[in-house]
Image: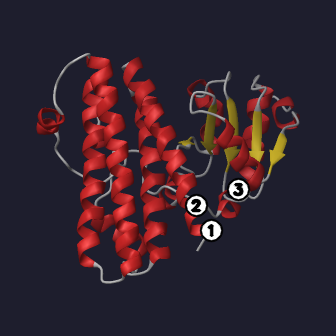
Amino acid sequence: MRWKQFLTPVKSIDVDQARAYMGEKSPDELTILDVRQPKEYEAGHIPGAKLIPLPDIPSRLGEIDSKKATVVYCAVGGRSRIAAQMMAGQGFSDVYNLSGGFKAWKGEAAFGAEEKGLELFTGNESVEETLVVAYSLEEGLRNFYQKMQTRVSNSDARSLFEKLSEIEAKHQKHVFDEYIKLTGGSVTREEFEKNIVVKALEGGLTTEEYANLFHPDWETVSDIIEVAMSIEAQALDLYLRVSDRSGDSQSQKVLRQIADEERKHLIQLGKLIESL
């Protein structure tokens, strides 16, 4: 490999700058690239990040769209700087190294291997089938919040679960409205829901898996919000990973729209936890 690829200067941005930059870009405009090893990615990664370990970058550059902006990160910023320099040397004009890496991120994160949750989607679904799966995942989470509302004794926790349930109901309505718009059909909500099979919560994990990850106190508002943020981050991550492998352009577009809604919900929850 030419030394020029290691010497090409690249811009570095800190965590706050990266968050602001990511917030301004849609999934169609930005690639978040994780150049750590698979086990590091599995333990925690920025939602929506594509994993290509640093040693694989030279042979897998074709998997990254050079027309998109790219934010590259690793654990602390060293490997990602080298990867960003390689990419810049190969014609990536809008690439940024995340200084401090994932260690400095300290924010919403997704967990699990690249294949986690993908069993819920084949990648060959029509846009209508994609919306049915998305609605099912929203239903799983709404049911969970409703059940928890009846099980906790703390009134603040009960109110929060009720609010979270209502938010998921709104998400479901958006998904259903999109289904009607695309199909031009007159199916009722009740008829549509006959297709629903709840296999997991949003993000592809079960309630038990989320609980085992965080061991939350379900009576504590801050713990509930932390878990809700994790679920939304996981959902954002899953929808973006599925969109990358979808073979249907309409499905890909819808998945990215849903992912963008999850991103907005994450921002709302972040503001809520800051207000506590």
- Amino acid type of disc 3? Gly
Residue 65 percent location from the top left of the image: 62, 24
The residue depicted at 46 percent of the width and 57 percent of the height is 111
Would you place residue 91 above or below residue 162 in this image? above
All told, the count of numbered labels is 3
Residue 270 is marked as 2
Q: Is residue 172 left or right of residue 71?
A: left
Foreground pick, 196 / 60: 196
Residue 9 percent location from the top left of the image: 88, 36
The residue depicted at 80 percent of the width and 48 percent of the height is 13
Task: Give the image's coloring scheme.
Answer: secondary structure
Foreground pick, 7 / 218: 218
- Amino acid type of disc 2? Gly
- Amino acid type of disc 1? Glu
Foreground pick, 127 / 189: 189
Could you tell me if the residues under marks 2 and 1 are in contact, i.e. CB atoms within 8 Å?
yes
Q: Which residue is mark 1?
A: 274
Residue 101 is marked as 3
Q: Secondary structure at mark 2?
A: helix
For marks 1 and 3, the one nearer the N-term is 3
Residue 140 appears in the figure: yes
